[in-house]
Amino acid sequence: MSQQKNGYVDESAFIKDVTFESSCKIYKGTRVINSNLGEHVAINDFTVVQNSELCERNTIQRNNSIYNSKIGRYTYTGRNTHIWNAEIGAFNSISWNVGIGGANHDYEKVTTHAFLYSKDFEIIKEAPLYDRFQEPCIIGNDVWIGCNAVICRDVIVGDGAVIAAGAVVTKNVEPYTIVAGVPARTLKKRFPDEIIQELQKCKWWKLGPDILSNNLDLFNTKPTKAVLKRIKEICIENNVYYSEGK
């Protein structure tokens, strides 16, 4: 056990080529390789993080695997979640048993078998014959992903979206849209279009924690015009309001 400034590294953790802050907590049996960890990142038991960037206050629960991915600040995962080659934004709530960005098999070829890209079967000798991760997998900010959901490759999930438990997402999800089912289909928008448009301009997830802490009442209520007006003012004051919604 290694106790650091407000942080902790278990003696059984394997850490190689990793940049991390003294406030990070790395627990039993974890493997963290060739990755960057921001302040107050917590990686729980038996999780693997490789070739990835975890940002401020990420909490990764036990038995996760995260490869070649970037996860934005304050996003957290539940147990047994697996993430491959994905770009994930800030303040996302990712439940347990979620799969994000799993590799594609090219079903248009004669065979879908892994011997076309994996040397494990000692058939292919050189580089893979195709890239299973070529298509992007991008999750926006303030997205809620329910348990047992699967987000496929070649998918962009917009800010504020909700992915229902057990959904299999094969197509893009618009911002502030709720989807469910296999394959996932739109159930409804979370808010009217004019509210969604304003929320997309207010990039509140870029605000500092002190500002959020001082305005909890605004985020613990429905987005009325008065609430949105105040959030807009705060975002403008802190240079995170974008009139074009970019």
Image (cartoon, rainbow, N blue to C red):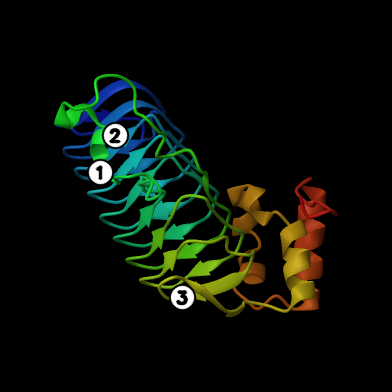
Tell me the quarter of the picture where residue 226 sits. Answer: bottom right
- Residue type, numbered disc 3: Ala
- Left or right of 79 on screen, residue 176: right
Q: Quadrant of the N terminus?
A: top left
Q: Residue furthest front?
A: 110
- How many numbered markers are drawn? 3
Tell me how far mark 1 sits from mark 3, CA to CA: 30 Å
Tell me how far mark 2 sits from mark 1, CA to CA: 7 Å
Relative depth, front residue between 162 and 201: 162
Q: Mark 3 sits on what residue?
A: 180
Tell me the quarter of the picture where residue 46 sits. Answer: top left
In this rendering, the answer to whether 82 lies above or below 121 is below
Q: Is label 2 in a helix, a strand or a loop?
A: helix
- Residue type, numbered disc 1: His
- Left or right of 125 on screen, residue 178: right
State if disc 1 and disc 2 touch (CB < 8 Å). yes
State if disc 3 and disc 2 touch (CB < 8 Å). no
The residue under the point 35% across, 46% down is 105
Q: Mark 2 sits on what residue?
A: 116
Tell me how far mark 2 sits from mark 3, CA to CA: 33 Å
Mark before the other along the chain sequence, 2 or 3: 2
- Residue type, numbered disc 2: Leu
- Left or right of 168 on screen, residue 239: right
Residue 11 appears in the rendering: no
Relative depth, front residue between 144 and 99: 99
Q: Mark 1 sits on what residue?
A: 113
Q: Position of residue 67 (x, y in %)?
A: 36, 37
Mark before the other along the chain sequence, 1 or 3: 1
The residue under the point 82% across, 68% down is 229
